């Protein structure tokens, strides 16, 4: 993945994944060492191997829709297909790639969606890429002037999700994390459901998860995938990682091993519904 995430375009960098899971620190260090070693064994650019070009956007949208339908659909046919029916949602795509998935997914799940900054442009003409109360001022006013049930906003690569109430106020990230973590914990049939989060996340997450019958484990900021692997390795047969998150960034482990703001938008909207 080539991305500057929530940073300015000049900060573009490279993220590496295998089977949908980000490389861990050890694997990244091996690559870094090879790059800086001036090793003559490094392959020349024309020897890098084969490449292939695929379009997976529609499959991805389908996967998110199916995941949310299966989790929140209910038994009635219409409700099962459209669990967000009756919900009005505003989406600030921030000129990022979320514009290609979040509005479409929410609409297919039954919501009425209004999108802004929905043209993909890596120079981010609508606002700064990082969604904060300061950069979302116009979006907040738009929400407050409308009749929406909630608003959601992304950064450039759509791994971050900021949630706003119908009054345009940003809902604290730890509140969202606690609500989603409690849902996954209560919904799990595991004897030892675990939520992985980071030290900067509030103790209210521990309280909600504990009340739902699970426990919280923490890992340093930026390496949620390593925390998931650690807990899986150290856990017992009864242990199941049901959710992993740092503020604004969520891994829905039953869906995939990556941080996914589009899936988060759909799950949060379903919980609101």
Image: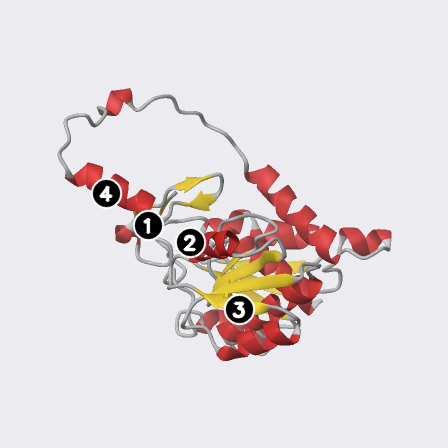
Residues tagged 2 and 1 counted as in contact (Cβ below 8 A): yes
Residue 252, compared with residue 43, is above or below; it is below
Along the line of sight, the residue nearer the viewer: 61 or 107: 61
Spatial distance from mark 2 to mark 3, Cα to Cα?
15 Å
- Which residue is tagged 3? 216
Where does the image place residue 222, in percent across and percent down from the top left? 38, 59
In the structure shown, which secondary structural element does the residue marked by tag 3 occupy? strand
Quadrant of the image containing the C terminus: bottom right
Label whose residue precedes the other's in the sequence (2 or 3): 3
Spatial distance from mark 4 to mark 3, Cα to Cα?
32 Å
Between marks 2 and 4 in the image, the one whose residue lies nearer the viewer:
2
Label whose residue precedes the other's in the sequence (1 or 4): 1
- Which residue is tagged 4? 32
Label whose residue precedes the other's in the sequence (2 or 1): 1
Label whose residue precedes the other's in the sequence (3 or 1): 1
Q: Residue at x 85, y 55 (%)?
A: 75
Spatial distance from mark 2 to mark 1, Cα to Cα?
8 Å
Which numbered tag is attached to residue 108? none
- Which residue is tagged 2? 226
Label whose residue precedes the other's in the sequence (2 or 4): 4
Label whose residue precedes the other's in the sequence (4 or 3): 4
């Amino acid at each position: 993945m080539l991305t500057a995430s929530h940073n300015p375009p000049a900060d573009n960098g490279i993220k590496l994944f295998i089977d949908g899971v980000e490389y861990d620190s050890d694997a990244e260090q091996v690559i870094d060492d090879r790059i800086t070693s001036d090793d003559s064994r490094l392959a020349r650019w024309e020897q890098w191997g084969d490449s292939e070009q695929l379009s997976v956007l529609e499959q991805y949208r389908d996967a998110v829709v199916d995941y949310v339908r299966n989790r929140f659909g209910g038994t009635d046919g219409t409700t099962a297909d459209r669990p967000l029916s009756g919900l009005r949602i505003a989406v600030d795509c921030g000129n990022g790639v979320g514009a290609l998935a979040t509005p479409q997914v929410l609409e297919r799940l039954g919501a009425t969606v209004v999108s802004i900054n929905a043209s993909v442009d890596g120079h981010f003409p609508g606002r700064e890429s990082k969604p904060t109360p300061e950069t979302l001022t116009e979006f907040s006013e738009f929400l407050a002037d409308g009749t929406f049930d909630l608003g959601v906003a992304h950064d450039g690569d759509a791994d971050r999700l900021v949630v706003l109430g119908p009054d345009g106020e940003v809902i604290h990230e730890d509140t969202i994390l606690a609500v989603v973590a409690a849902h996954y914990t209560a919904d799990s049939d595991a004897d030892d459901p675990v939520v992985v989060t980071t030290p900067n996340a509030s103790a209210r997450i521990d309280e909600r998860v504990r009340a739902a019958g699970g426990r919280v484990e923490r890992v340093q900021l930026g390496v949620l995938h390593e925390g998931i692997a650690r807990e899986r390795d150290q856990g017992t047969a009864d242990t199941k990682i049901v959710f992993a998150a740092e503020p604004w960034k969520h891994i829905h482990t039953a869906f995939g091993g990556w941080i996914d703001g589009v899936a988060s938008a759909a799950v949060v909207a379903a919980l609101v519904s």
